[in-house]
Image (cartoon, helix red, strand yellow):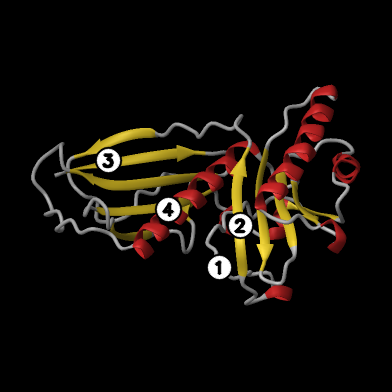
Amino acid sequence: MGTIRKIYRFEKFIEIEEYHDGRYGAPGKKREKKKKPTPEQMEKVNQMNREKKTRWRMREYFKENDYFTTLTYRKEERPPDMKQAKEDFKRFIRKMKDWYRKKGYEIFWIRNIEHGTKGGWHVHLVINRIEDTDILLTKAWPHGKVINELMYEKGGFADLAAYITKTEKTGESEEPEKKGRKIKEASHSASRNMPLPKPKIRRLIRWPKEPYVKKGWILEKGTCHEGTNPVTGYQYRHYTLMKPANPHRRI
């Protein structure tokens, strides 16, 4: 049984996916018996795919000094439902898109609208930063406060991708001041002008025993995950390589 290796190259990272291809190559490890996945297993796979695609888009289209913004609602401005919250966001992002265009820039964004169990609404937004973005955000959002942070302040892109893709109705907030608070409802979306990067594909005759580490790169700690896909029944592995820190770089 052959192996497919997909390599996604970014400025500072390389993400690699490996999985068995039953249609190619010499005989190898047997495929486990395919089982119908449980709803919990499917949600886990779906969430993993949401995080992965969001992480790739962040690494392809955003920089560490772009904004992670939270749009809040005053109590009297809270929408009655998710449909109205989405309409509020559409009006907001339309204004931002027009202002970016007038300044000669293309806008990129990823957002998650969340409705807490206590009635509070807010929007988490990743947006590319240009001159006066903070001012434009405040002008475009009349419903409450606008809180801006630089993306690097929210940790690595992997952590932020996981945080901004929460869609399960029983998820818990991971922000320290809201630890354990239930999220009743969430809606994740992104601008359509961010196509996913295309990988370089390699076909291997057999399953590699160890992750492939390109010369001059290192395996990022904690990113190597292996298991069996509950849908296909095939073994998989995915991991991330990163450039090592330069000890001679001046700070």
Distance from disc 2 to disc 1, alpha carbons, whole Å, reads 9 Å
> In the image as oriented, which residue stretches furthest toward the bottom?
180
Secondary element at image label 3: strand
The residue at which mark 3 appears reads as 4
Secondary element at image label 2: strand
In primary-sequence order, the first of circles 2 and 3 is: 3
**Mark 3–mark 4 CB contact (< 8 Å):** no
**Which residue is rendered at x = 31% and y = 63% of the image?**
38
Q: Which mark is drawn over residue 8? A: none
**Mark 1–mark 4 CB contact (< 8 Å):** no
Q: Which mark is drawn over residue 171? A: 1
Distance from disc 3 to disc 4, alpha carbons, whole Å, reads 21 Å
> In the image as oriented, which residue stretches furthest toward the front?
80
**Mark 2–mark 3 CB contact (< 8 Å):** no
In primary-sequence order, the first of circles 1 and 4 is: 4
In primary-sequence order, the first of circles 3 and 4 is: 3
**Which residue is rendered at x = 8% and y = 45% of the image?**
27
In screen coordinates, is 186 left or right of 120? left
Distance from disc 1 to disc 3, alpha carbons, whole Å, reads 34 Å
The residue at which mark 4 appears reads as 46
Secondary element at image label 1: loop
